[in-house]
Every structure is written in structure tokens, then in C-alpha cells.
């Protein structure tokens, strides 16, 4: 069962999402409210585990910032999907840089929203038109200045191959491949897009066009 929290200051949006989740298989809305603070207070009072996925409005009416909201939710243990009208590219990029797993437009069919929640709950990167538009609109966000070798190592490693096999495929020593991955992580930190886990590296590779969601280790 995927546990979902909905945070949006428009009640009609929340009610629509609640109804859609109720119709979906193995999806349960555990919280629905208008602010991140309300969600965190609910968790503290109920001693509830974090939701698997939090569907978060890009801009809430309580004076909070995009970065603040995404980071608070992510730090509490949930993946974050931004649910937005997507008419503020800078704010969308800010949300992605803060750690949001992806963005889905409020203009999208409800089935696409539910599919996005299911994908993120399974740890899959969310790569869609809204995401691509936000990244393409800001090359400074997208470009971590990776070398050709670093991109090759990242592509194979993020696609699922163990680092030793990555090294074998590229004809380099294991220590060299490991050093490349370490440098990749440092470069992403330097541009404000940390990637401490392999899933994070996969997201960065998809964001930067190094890897597509349909690729896997067998294709590489």
C-alpha cells in the first residue's frame, strides 16, 4: 500500500486527488491539508510514519518558500512531487534543486498524476514535459560540467551496473571508476544538486540527458 499525503491550499484540488487515490489500487491518502506545518504537526501528534509520497502545491498561501517546504517534507522522510500549474519555471527549478522527485502539471489528466505518484513511490525517476521544460530553461541548473569519462561512468552506474562491471566495460581500473563517481557527486554538490545515493545519481543522469528512463543495465 502506497501512503500519500496531499498538501495544497485549494480544498477542491485536494478533494479531487483524494477521490482519484481512493479509486487507485494500493493507494491510501493518510493526510490532506493546506500546509507543510499542518502535515508535520499531524505526524507528531499521531506518531505516524512519513507518507511514501507527498503531493505538494508549488506555492502555498502561508508565506512559506518552495525550498523550505520541499526540504522540510524530504527531511521528514517522504518523496515529494510538485503539483503545479507550471507557470513559474524559476520556482519549479527551485523545487527540483531542493530535492523534489519531480513535477506534474495540474492540467494533466488525473490518471497521469496517479501514475506519477506510483512511479515515485517505487523509486523511479519522474521524467516528463514539465520536468524537461524546467531543466531546459536553466542550463546552469542542468550543467554540472561533467567530463566525457565521468558521464560514461555515471550513465552505466546509474543504469544499475555494479561499479566493478562499469570499470570492466570502460576498460579502466575499479579505483578509477570509483574516483569518477566521487568526482561526479562533488560536482553535483557544487551546483546545488546533491546526489548522495544511487537513486539520486539516476535522477541527475535523467535530468541532464545522460540516461533516459527506459534505459537499463542491459541496454548500456
Image: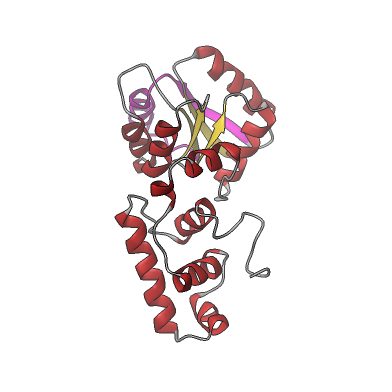
**Which color scheme does this rendered protein use?**
secondary structure
Residue 97 in the image: above or below residue 33: below
Left or right, 19 with reference to 71: right
Quarter occupied by residue 78 = top left
Residue 105 is at least partly visible in this image:
yes
Horizontal and vertical percent position of residue 82:
48, 33
- Give the percent coordinates (x, y) of residue 62: 33, 17
| 191 vs 134: above or below | below
Q: Nearer the viewer, residue 82 or 207?
A: 207
State which region is magenta: 27-52
What residue do we see at 39% from left, 21% from top?
A: 60
Residue 24's place in the image compared with 165, above or below, is above
Residue 41 appears left or right of 78: left
In this rendering, position of residue 75 left or right of residue 216: left
Where is residue 93, by image quadrant? top left
Q: Position of residue 59 (x, y in %)?
A: 41, 23
Residue 32 located within the stretch drawn in magenta: yes
**Between 9 and 206, which is closer to the camera in this rendering?**
206
Q: Is residue 114 above or below residue 156?
A: above
Q: Quadrant of the N terminus?
A: top right
Magenta span contains residue 115: no
Q: Position of residue 118 (x, y in %)?
A: 61, 41
All told, the count of numbered labels is 0
In the rendered image, the quadrant that contains the C terminus is bottom right
Q: Residue shown at 56%/33% (left/top)?
A: 104
Amino acid at each position: 500500500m502506497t501512503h500519500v499525503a496531499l498538501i495544497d491550499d485549494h480544498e477542491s484540488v485536494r478533494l479531487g486527488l483524494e477521490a482519484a487515490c481512493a479509486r487507485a489500487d494500493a493507494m491510501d491518502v493518510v493526510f490532506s491539508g493546506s500546509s507543510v506545518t499542518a502535515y508535520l504537526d499531524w505526524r507528531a501528534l499521531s506518531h505516524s510514519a512519513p507518507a511514501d509520497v507527498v503531493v505538494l502545491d508549488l506555492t502555498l498561501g502561508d508565506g512559506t518558500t518552495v525550498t523550505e517546504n520541499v526540504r522540510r517534507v524530504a527531511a521528514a522522510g517522504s518523496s515529494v512531487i510538485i503539483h503545479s500549474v507550471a507557470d513559474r519555471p524559476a520556482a519549479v527549478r527551485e523545487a527540483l534543486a531542493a530535492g523534489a522527485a519531480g513535477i506534474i502539471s495540474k492540467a494533466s489528466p488525473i490518471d497521469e498524476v496517479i501514475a506519477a505518484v506510483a512511479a515515485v513511490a517505487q523509486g523511479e525517476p519522474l521524467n516528463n514535459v514539465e520536468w524537461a521544460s524546467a531543466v531546459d530553461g536553466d542550463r546552469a541548473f542542468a550543467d554540472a560540467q561533467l567530463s566525457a569519462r565521468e558521464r560514461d561512468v555515471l550513465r552505466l552506474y546509474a543504469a544499475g551496473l555494479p561499479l566493478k562491471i562499469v570499470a570492466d566495460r570502460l576498460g579502466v581500473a575499479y579505483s578509477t571508476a570509483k574516483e569518477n563517481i566521487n568526482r561526479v557527486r562533488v560536482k553535483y554538490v557544487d551546483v546545488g544538486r546533491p546526489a548522495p545515493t544511487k537513486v539520486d545519481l539516476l535522477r541527475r543522469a535523467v535530468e541532464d540527458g545522460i540516461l533516459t528512463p527506459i534505459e537499463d543495465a542491459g541496454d548500456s
